[in-house]
Amino acid sequence: MADRLGLIAGNGTFPFLVLDAARARGQRLGRPPAMTPEQVRHAKALLAQPDASIASIARLLGVSRSTLYKYVPELKEGSDARAIEATGEESDA
């Protein structure tokens, strides 16, 4: 089969053809996202609560703290993480 495709054994091009065929069929490739958009909204809503810590929110959602920081970039911007509202925007308070 490889000789019909014009491939030379061992040149490493065949896996790319398989991936291109999978993409053409509409299949998603790679690792799935760690958090769904709904989980991100839930995390932002929980961050608005004064007694919720980042560690407790991560534990509740079943992700690591670093994953939470990755999906909620507002946490990196400043030390005032409590200013994040459920809508994802910072308040002036």
Image: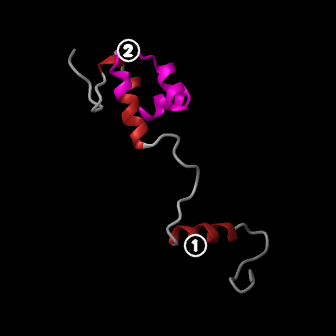
Q: Main secondary structure of the magenta part?
A: helix
- Residue at the far front: name it: 60
Indicate left or right for 63 with 38 as reference: right
Q: Residue at x 53, y 65 (%)?
A: 27
The secondary structure type at the circle numbered 2 is loop
Magenta segment boundaries in residue numbering: 45-72
Question: Can you identify the residue that label 1 sits on?
Answer: 21
Question: Can you identify the residue that label 2 sits on?
Answer: 79
Percent of width and height locating residue 53: 45, 16
The three-letter code of the residue at mark 2 reads Ser
Q: Quadrant of residue 20?
A: bottom right
Q: Residue at x 39, y 13 (%)?
A: 51
Instruction: Identify which residue, 67 or 18, lies in the foreground.
Output: 67
* Image height of 36 relative to 83, above or below: below
Check the picture and name the quadrant holding the C terminus: top left
Q: Residues within 10 Å of mark 1 (few under 14, many from 20)?
A: few
